Image (spheres, helix red, strand yellow):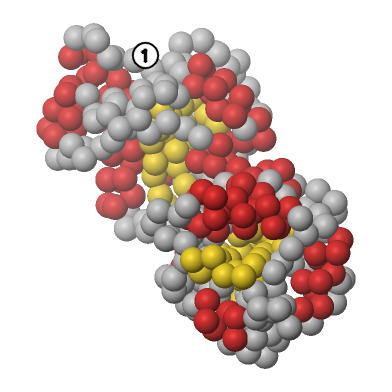
Amino acid sequence: MTKTRVIKIDPFSPREDYLKEASDALVAGKLVTIPTETVYGIAADMSNKQAAERLSRLKNRSPDKPFSLHIDTKESVEGIAKNIPLAAYKLIDKFWPGPLTLVLNSKSDKTIGMRMPDNEVALRIIALSQVPIACPSANIAGKPAPRNIDEALAGLDGLVDLAVDAGPCKLGIESSVVDLSKGEAKILREGAISKEEIFKVANTKIVLFVCTGNSCRSVMAKALLERKLKEAKRADVEVFSAGIMLISGMGASFETQELLRAEGLDVSAHRSQRINEVMVKKSDLILVMERAHEERILQLAPEVKNRVFLLKEFANPVRNYGIINKEKSVSNGAKINETNLDIPDPIGRPREFYEAALETIREAVEKVARII
């Protein structure tokens, strides 16, 4: 039997030609042993019928039982799955890249497992191949999952075409598997991530405040709501803030820091971040300062329409309705005034503009804290 060719790669500075050799082998229908952060796996192109059948035989698995796919970006899940539940986005944002496999409904009306490995070599090979990659553990059925290349080749030398040696796996334990195909999280395998961690993240409510630059209004709102939640001993809610502008990494404005410091709140460690799809889709409640922010969010993710509100709606007595009902009906039948619901951006304006914004935000946040 011909021995498997082994490529030794520096995991911190992998050679591009070696990565390309591995990805080219996959595209050609070969089986390639590659590292992940959990265990070594056998990678194969699932769009290649012969490669898929060969992998099934090697793993002693029925062709009717599909393998999970390994992907290289969080966004890739959108092209494969449909009807992705809110809990899935929470788990993706928290644990990907990492040792978590999610089972979701595929666009072909079946279920499919997906994982984004936390291993640069694996991610680069997957990205370069541009084909759907399955990567079950590189062991014969009944044998332990391999943590290094020697263990991987102990039963597979000559049975796979190429092996990539990038040193020992960081974790050495298989991924946890969570089925979300029916909406609620069901643990199929408890691996590197405990079931307690998984359920805690999946069941946590997420509130996202959005403004323009994420340096004043959304910072105020986040700090005030976090304090209210702490006072209420609420550990089941997480609060985030973000902006729609391109700039990230900026601190809170001087005026914002000063006003909140007077409130006993320290936001000196705050760094701005720009909203993205996963951030938006994982949030149970999205509160924006202006209609322009709502419009930008709905461009990113139209499906979150029923979870986006202008924060000032909660500061206006006539806008008294639940956060789940996006129809925004008013219980007393009064006509809703759609004007003047923006909280103006105080950036570049005198201190009194910041003070006015803070008071409006405070009133709204107090109501939000009572209903979430």
192 lies left or right of 62? left
Work out whether 71 lies above or below 326.
Answer: below
Query: Please, which residue is most extreme toward the front here?
Result: 2
Residue 250 locus on image (x, y percent): 27, 29
Where does the N terminus fall, quadrant-wise?
A: bottom right
Work out whether 337 lies above or below 26.
Answer: above
Residue nearer the viewer, 120 or 110? 120
Residue nearer the viewer, 320 or 108? 108
Work out whether 356 lies above or below 6.
Answer: above
Is residue 289 in sight in this rendering?
no
55 lies left or right of 328? right
133 lies left or right of 343? right
The residue at 55%/13% (across/down) is 338
Tell me the quarter of the picture where residue 366 sits. top left
Q: Amino acid at mark 1?
A: Pro
Residue nearer the viewer, 48 or 248? 48
* Residue occupied by mark 1: 344
Residue count near mark 1 (Cα–Cα under 10 Å), binned few <14, some 14–19, many ≥20: some
Is residue 228 in sight in this rendering?
yes
Residue 262 locus on image (x, y percent): 12, 32
Tell me the quarter of the picture where residue 117 sits. bottom right
Residue nearer the viewer, 6 or 320? 6
The residue at 58%/79% (across/down) is 152
257 lies left or right of 94? left
Query: Please, which residue is most extreme toward the bottom here?
Result: 142
The residue at 79%/82% (across/down) is 60
- Asked which secondary structure carries label 1, the reply is loop
Tell me the quarter of the picture where residue 301 sits. top right
The residue at 65%/74% (across/down) is 4
